[in-house]
Amino acid sequence: MRKSQIIIGGIIALIVGIQACEKFEPGLPLEDSLLDGPIEGLSLSEMQRFNDGDRTFNNEVFTVEKGLGPLFVSNSCVSCHAGDGKGNPFSTLTRFGQVDETGNQFLHLGGPQLQNRAIPGYQPEVLPMGATFSRFTPPAVTGLGLLEFVPDDVLLQMADPNDLDGDGISGRVNWINIPSYIKPRSGSISQNGRYIGRFGKKASVYDLLQQTVDAFAQDMGISTLYHPIDVYSGQNADPEISTQRVNNVGFYLQTLKAPIPRNQTDSEVIKGKALFTQVNCSSCHQPKLTTGNAPISALAFKDFYPYTDLLLHDMGPGLDDGYTEGIAKTNEWRTPPLWGLGLSPNSQGGKYFLMHDGRATSIEQAIELHGGEAAASRQQYNKLSPTDKAAIIKFLKSL
Amino acid sequence: MHKKYYVTLLISVSLFVPALVHAQIDSTLFRRAENKDSLNNTMNMDAIYNRPMLSAGKLPVALGGYMEANWQHIGQDGVSQGNQFQFRRFTIFMASTISKRIKFMSELEFENGTKEINIEFAALDMEFHPLLNLRGGIILSPIGAFNQNHDGPKWEFTDRPISATQLLPSTWSNAGFGLYGKHYDDDWMFGYEAYVSGGFDQSIINNEQGKTYLAATKSNTDRFELSLTGQPLFSGKLAARNNRIGEIGISYMGGIYNRYIDNGNVIDEKRTLSVYAVDFNTKIPHIKTFITGEWAWIKLMVPESYTQQYGERQQGGFVDIVQPVLQRKILGWPKASLSLACRLEYVDWNVGKLRETGDNIGEDLWSVVGGLSFRPNSETVLRLNYRHQRSRDFFANPPVLLGGFSFGISTYF
């Protein structure tokens, strides 16, 4: 009798135990501490595409057999954008060969991007003599779909290339030539056959498909149907990845959620937010944008808070590397979104690597590097009390 | 696919033909070669033969094997895999004493159903002298202890040690030849092994793991007939055992791993791989606590212009502590035992610093596994484990947490 009671008790304990198993597994990190995740409102089929793209972006390592190289910068998407966040100097890439709007003069010598790594048996590229260059630290990739569907006319309305309002902030769009495989969005505005670029440090990329195709080609040496060229030899090449998977990666980037701000009711954060506007940082780092029509309904007509105007601004001689893209000048940089800034160390190895090339290792350093159109805001920031400065920093870390 | 069918057919014939010949045979007529107490009479290098086998009548072949099946409920950072039922391994041993001092032993393994079918060991042993034995065939490299002593029923954990299976990478076998021998002196035993065999290939630095991963070579099924390097892999081990203290072994495995000549033309530099390991095991008298572990260091040449994600140095190991808490008749099994167990594991897949920042490279993992095991006899084990694991990516970003329960059964047959 005692034995059977033990057995029955054991079976009941086992059943209860199995039901409770999940309680003993690691919990989900706080939602606002993660950059990964889909935007709200995707349909079931869109969610499947998101997952397919997620697997390629975050899980896939490209090998020689899968098309890597022979020259490359990185062997996976995630090695540049860990957790969909900003990259580390390890994956910072080098662009070279263009000094003005006449175009890149070093395309025949491997430009515009230096492939600084090579599979065994090959030698990586070295910078050609006389080529000016700039180093680009990979950006976070969250919320990009929202940025993609901000209408062109909104960007043009924010632009003030001749500073007609006299606030010291100009801002202009980068008119770029788009590749033949890109179909302009409906409502796109063109000028002399050029379209408005909005992605990349110099706003030289039109949309996320182009960004994806460029990354496969220039960063990983993987040819696609869209760009069937081997960047090593410059010769035609068979696609090394299916078009569907390239499209799904593009879709994944479009539908990644926007970073979720934290501590928004904290009084110091509220104060910092007001000071941010007071010292005029928000002229370029526009808090709010709104999407227009979009083929993905979850992205259409949405208000969001990226803290960018997607425009080019003169950032002064300190940030002038002597290299550019499109019609941007060498001292002009696209305003980077500030959303997710506080989560940067989670993907950059516990540290900050800010500005276009990661040269700033703190938010304070990054502010100090602002020159040109941003110099006035920097000076106003420097006049603030230590308490007020701390409030701005806390606000920025809350984004 | 065809290879799988042939192997399955071969096994079926080898198993069922004797059964048909002795149709309706009384199973008590099978003679069981009992597993000996591994603590007092044998060394790790003997694990290949230290297995229970059955032989029938005058059949020249003894048969045995083991199986492992698991249930697990594991989650990672809040995402649970739910209930997973796994048939990890079904392994068949076939051994034969061909004549005095000439033996043959083989181990054929089906992993995860029939997803992987491998001949893990199939070698002829000829003894010229206790200190001089020739072994040839598919051999298990004597690196660390686990590689040769890996049978599921011997362990108190549902999972094999990560450092042993992925770093070293157990079970690692290849076609080759070599010598081994042992010397006894009262309570002391000394053993050596030295083999040359086919080696690794370039997949160890060109794989979908995105890190130096010796286990990647195991997916190259051509390695039993073609060594792309044309160079032998040397593996060797020295071990000493005292019956009162325990056993310690030091081992080495190394050679050129990359294809540097193709079609007679030099296409790359020669790159070497070296693996060093130390292993030990002991049983504390009176309280019968069994402790075993191993630690390995890996060094290899990686082209400087390649990515640092494929590290030049790795290290890792594990320690198992098993404490019997009950050894008596339980539920009618006269020699049953109940044990508590704990495993500590650590693996650093990429030892070094980032060239760009000088910061330590992450890509490491540690885990603690607690366990409760029940053995109705020495050859069958039921085990319940809980794993807590932390792993960091290449940049040493905040760790990914993994944890959960697993339950498994494993038995020799």
Image (cartoon, rainbow, N blue to C red):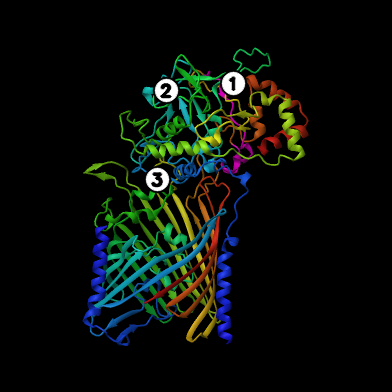
Q: Which element carries disc 1, helix, strand or loop?
A: strand
Q: Residues within 10 Å of mark 1 (few under 14, many from 20)?
A: many
**Residue nearest the viewer, comparing B277 with B206:** B206
Residue A313: mark: 1
- Number of labels in the image equals 3
- Rendered location of residue B58, percent (x, y): 23, 84
Q: Chain of mark 1?
A: A
- Rendered location of residue A14, percent (x, y): 55, 72
Q: Which residue is mark 3?
A: B302
The range drawn in magenta is A328-352
Residue A233: mark: none
- Whether residue B181 is situated above or below residue B221 in the rendered picture: below
Circle 3: residue type = Val
Do circles 1 and 3 both sit on a common chain?
no
Q: Quadrant of residue A107?
A: top left
Q: Residues within 10 Å of mark 3 (few under 14, many from 20)?
A: some
- Whether residue A109 is situated above or below residue A31 in the rendered picture: above
Q: CA distance from mark 2 to mark 1?
A: 29 Å
Q: Which residue is mark 2?
A: A129
- Rendered location of residue B87, percent (x, y): 40, 66
**Residue nearest the viewer, comparing A164 with A61:** A164
